[in-house]
Amino acid sequence: NAGVTQTPKFQVLKTGQSMTLQCAQDMNHNSMYWYRQDPGMGLRLIYYSASEGTTDKGEVPNGYNVSRLNKREFSLRLESAAPSQTSVYFCASTGGDHNSPLHFGNGTRLTVT
Amino acid sequence: GNSVTQMEGPVTLSEEAFLTINCTYTATGYPSLFWYVQYPGEGLQLLLKATKADDKGSNKGFEATYRKETTSFHLEKGSVQVSDSAVYFCALRGTGGFKTIFGAGTRLFVKA
């Protein structure tokens, strides 16, 4: 059982380049999330998708877009990367009720130069 | 809005020492509370959870009790091992909400 799979694991971009981070889950979860992790700041929510066909902004959405392609897949796009977007990005998913924990992928380490 | 505050690290302990990592929260209603652990190079994974007042979550020797009167969910372990070295995150998910809010994380180092 793969759980939550993220690709790529590492990426280096130049300022202004674009890229898409991919995420897929095989647990039939309704809700999916993108977080970024920066030293001393915990995890901050970028965007989430409560169910297939819906997306909503989190705490730090500026500079990002998302697509919930189907129930399994939720991608994060950086249209014009900036050094401030250097971070580790985590995708997560969860089942329906508020007792359900998040299941995380192993992260994408992104460096923007 | 909802928030989580946990003690700053790093915390450095010797093997077999007692561990407490403090966590307090602000939330309306009755949120679910979680502790997650992150080992180097990996994503977060659930360590334990509690879903109502006075519940005790436990796993791998770790425990935390949901205290509504003090809005706390402190993580404890009686005897830590080197393999417990990791970053620990306290988190909450509100009733009817889709978002999980995290504390800043506490890094634990355990020396042999």
Image: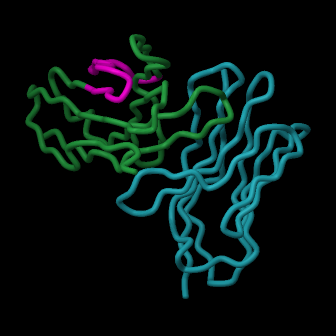
Determine the residue positioned at 11% across, 31% down.
A15
Colour in which chain B is drawn: cyan
Q: Residue at x 45, y 62 (%)?
A: B39
Which chain is drawn using green?
A: A
Q: Above or below — where is A23 with respect to B54?
A: above
Q: Which of the 4 image quarters holds residue B58?
A: bottom right
Residue A67 in the image: above or below residue A73: above
How many labels were placed on the picture? 0
- Quadrant containing the C terminus of chain A is top left
Asked whether residue A66 is in view, the answer is no
Of the pair B63 and B7, the residue shown nearer to us: B63
Q: In the rendered view, does A83 fall on the left or right side of A92?
A: left
Residue at screen point 61% across, 55% down = B47
Q: Residue at x 38, y 43 (%)?
A: A4
In this image, A111 relative to A44: left or right? Answer: left
Residues drawn in magenta:
A59-76
- Nearer to us in this view, B70 or B52: B52
State the image coordinates of residue B14 (x, y, percent, origin top left).
62, 83
**Residue B84's spot in the image, x, y percent?**
56, 71
Magenta run includes residue A49: no
Q: Is residue B41 above or below residue A105?
A: below
Q: Residue furthest bottom?
A: B112
> With A76 as the anchor, is B89 left or right in this view?
right
Q: Position of residue B89 (x, y in %)?
A: 58, 50
Q: Quadrant of residue A61?
A: top left
Q: Is residue A5 left or right of residue B24?
A: left
In the depicted view, which residue is nearer to us: A103 or B13?
A103
Colouring method of the image: by chain
Provide residue B53's location: percent of width, then percent of height: 87, 39
A71 or A50: which is nearer to us? A71
- Is residue B5 among the parts visible in the rendering? yes
Magenta-drawn stretch contains A74: yes
